[in-house]
Image (cartoon, rainbow, N blue to C red):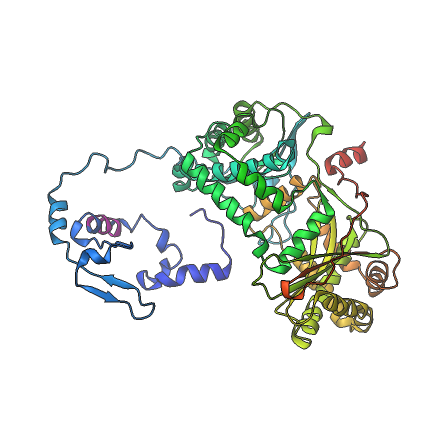
């Protein structure tokens, strides 16, 4: 009843398996319908499953077959041994057995909502929309802005569902003090996420969900679902952050999985290792896989329990509440977080930060590595062109540039030259700094030769842009602008877009429309000037980092290394503070 409209493909795939069970008028809602009209089906299902004779028992194990004596068979496709045996004596015993007291309907689920009223019913005051299928351009309101605390709020008046989404980032520098703390934090997040599956089980049955995520900036909590019960769910989740029980078996399972993942890190695809080595070269603070593996092996359950108890001695909160809520309800949810976690504001100089290095102007920085996997036959090459921060129309030009070259790049190096199966281009971003990566994984040529092929392609791109028919250029511009504006189809996607702006502290809620306007205004001359500055072989302003990852059989006698200068891009500006300054 309150589901948001799914994508057409998802709807068709989801509905088609059950179409034979329902008349045409119930093809969509039939599988979710319990009443009215579903009572008889529910009764038959309960009666059928209450009869032990209707049970089919499957045993899987190394010794199960031998217990069945000579009635062993072999499955014809995978040659799996199996057997069948009669269990009538067990069934009769089950039928005679008294009903266990534990086998009873569960208690009433406290998270099932009872108030499904919409809080935005004043149609006259709704913001105007240009289309009945497209929501009006709304932006979050800043409800609270105090030292160490910000709360953003949007009351939904378009999607009209009794649901809401809430996100809270808890900013702390604790997660990146050293490699051991970083791995303890990662393990803690995994254990807390696992515990949440049990803690929030009833809430999940009632259509609510909760999650936890973390990065170098701290923890992010999220809750979503029917708005009436969200405060209760948020209180439950936030109250367990510092005291959920960490079981020994769960700890050992998660630690072993982390150690295994880090131990086999070098077995990743060479092209993935290129991305990893680029990140190590450009970003700080970061830890190597070897550092994290050493720390993971040293972790004890006491280390993680100590991390949990001392978690968040001081932290800043920033939150967004979006959906069927009013300002009072949003304030109440913020109070829940404050009551359960008792935040203490961080000084500005203690806020967690990650920096991105500026590559040298007019040079090609090159780094080379070997895959530590003797069975790997492929090498990989990545060429990264650093474009920089969002200034003027640079990011719009970068998106257009990538859209124009991606297919020719694949066609030339993959289809025509057949250098390898993995050939791609992509725009990447880290802490407000964007660039273009061109990647090739190949067992045909060594990385230096692949690099030369990539650079030859890039050198020819100017001619490609200059010769591009005006009609095709216009189609690329219109396509990109349309793609940028394809937002806010559902309340979930709108909430996610707003949270993306907030979590990156840009607060540029009009970004899709602003970028689309920039894209529509771009010309061929703009694109050629962009290429000449940042991609042309003759440019003195381009910044390039090349990463080679060699298969063991292709490794050179000596490896090139790079020591990049500690010259960093400035930290992204606080977009909210910028808005306040402009207003003043």
Region rendered in magenta: 41-47
**Could you say where residue 390 lies in the image, as x and y percent from the top left?**
77, 48
Can I make out residue 579 in this image?
A: yes
Quarter placement of the C terminus: top right
Residue 43 is covered by the magenta coloring = yes
Q: Residue 52 versus residue 130: which sits nearer the camera?
A: 52
Q: Residue at x 79, y 43 (%)?
A: 568
Q: Nearer the viewer, residue 142 or 213?
A: 213
Question: Closest to the observer: 92 or 225?
Answer: 92
- Seen at 60% across and 42% down, the residue is 292
- Whether residue 167 appears in this view of the structure is no
Q: Where does residue 375 sit, x and y in percent of width and height? A: 56, 63
Q: Is residue 514 above or below residue 214?
A: below
Task: List x then y, in percent, for residue 370.
Answer: 66, 58
Q: Position of residue 196 (x, y in %)?
A: 45, 37
> Does 224 sit above or below residue 13?
above
Name the one closer to the observer, 12 or 382: 382
Q: Residue furthest front?
A: 557
- Total count of labels: 0
Report the predominant secondary structure element of the magenta stretch.
helix
Residue lying furthest bottom in this view? 416
Query: Does residue 217 appear left or right of residue 329 in this picture?
Result: right
Residue 262 is left or right of residue 413, and the answer is: left
Vertical placement of 403 versus 161: above or below? below
49 drawn magenta: no
Q: Give the residue at x 68% y 44%.
A: 509
Residue at image location 49% in from the left, 50% down from the top: 4
């Amino acid at each position: 009843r309150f589901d948001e409209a799914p994508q057409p493909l998802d709807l068709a795939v989801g509905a088609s398996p059950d179409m034979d069970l329902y008349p045409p008028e119930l093809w969509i809602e039939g599988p979710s319908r319990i009443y009215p009209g579903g009572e008889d089906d529910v009764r038959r299902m309960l009666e059928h499953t209450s009869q032990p004779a209707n049970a089919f028992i499957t045993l899987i194990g190394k010794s199960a077959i031998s217990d069945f004596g000579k009635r062993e068979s072999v499955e014809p496709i995978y040659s799996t041994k199996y057997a069948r045996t009669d269990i009538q004596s067990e069934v009769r015993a089950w039928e005679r057995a008294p009903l266990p007291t534990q086998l009873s309907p569960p208690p009433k689920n406290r998270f099932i909502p009872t108030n499904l009223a919409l809080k935005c019913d004043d149609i006259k005051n709704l913001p105007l929309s240009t289309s009945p299928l497209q929501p009006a351009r709304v932006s979050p309101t800043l409800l609270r802005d105090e030292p160490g605390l910000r709360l953003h709020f949007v009351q939904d008046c378009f999607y009209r569902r009794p649901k809401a989404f809430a996100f809270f980032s808890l900013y702390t520098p604790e997660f990146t003090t050293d490699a051991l703390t970083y791995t303890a934090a990662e393990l803690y997040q995994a254990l807390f996420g696992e515990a949440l599956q049990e803690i929030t089980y009833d809430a999940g049955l009632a259509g609510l969900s909760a999650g936890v995520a973390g990065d170098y900036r701290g923890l992010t909590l999220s809750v979503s679902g029917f708005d009436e019960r969200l405060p209760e769910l948020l209180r439950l989740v936030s109250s367990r952050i510092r005291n959920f029980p960490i079981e020994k078996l769960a700890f050992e399972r998660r630690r072993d999985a982390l150690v295994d993942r880090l131990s086999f890190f070098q077995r990743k695809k060479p092209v993935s290792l290129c991305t990893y080595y680029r990140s190590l070269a450009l970003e700080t603070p970061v830890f190597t896989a070897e550092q994290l593996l050493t720390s993971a092996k040293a972790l004890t359950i006491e280390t993680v329990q100590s991390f949990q108890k001392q978690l968040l001695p001081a932290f800043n909160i920033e939150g967004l509440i979006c959906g069927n809520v009013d300002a009072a309800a949003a304030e109440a949810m913020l109070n829940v977080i404050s009551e359960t976690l008792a935040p203490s504001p961080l000084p500005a100089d203690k806020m967690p930060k990650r920096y991105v290095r500026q590559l040298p102007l007019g040079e090609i920085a090159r780094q080379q590595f070997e895959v530590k996997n003797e069975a790997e036959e492929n090498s990989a090459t990545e060429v990264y062109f650093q474009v920089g921060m969002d200034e003027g129309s640079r990011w719009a030009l970068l998106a257009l540039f990538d859209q124009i070259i991606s297919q020719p790049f694949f066609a030339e190096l993959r289809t025509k030259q057949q250098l390898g199966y993995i050939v791609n281009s992509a725009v990447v971003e880290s802490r407000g700094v964007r660039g273009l990566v061109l990647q090739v994984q190949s067992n045909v040529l060594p990385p230096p030769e692949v690099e030369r092929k990539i650079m030859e392609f890039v050198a020819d791109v100017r001619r490609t842009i200059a010769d591009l028919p005006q009609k095709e250029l216009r189609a690329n511009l219109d396509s990109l602008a349309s793609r940028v504006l394809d937002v806010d189809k559902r309340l979930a996607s709108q909430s996610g877009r707003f949270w993306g702006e907030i979590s990156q502290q840009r607060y540029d809620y009009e970004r899709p429309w602003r970028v689309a306007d920039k894209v529509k205004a771009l010309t061929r001359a703009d694109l050629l000037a962009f290429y000449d500055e940042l991609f042309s072989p003759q440019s003195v302003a381009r910044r390039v980092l090349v990463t080679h990852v060699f298969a063991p059989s292709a490794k050179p006698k000596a490896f090139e290394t790079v020591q990049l200068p500690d010259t960093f891009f400035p930290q992204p500006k606080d977009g909210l503070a910028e808005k306040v300054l402009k207003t003043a």
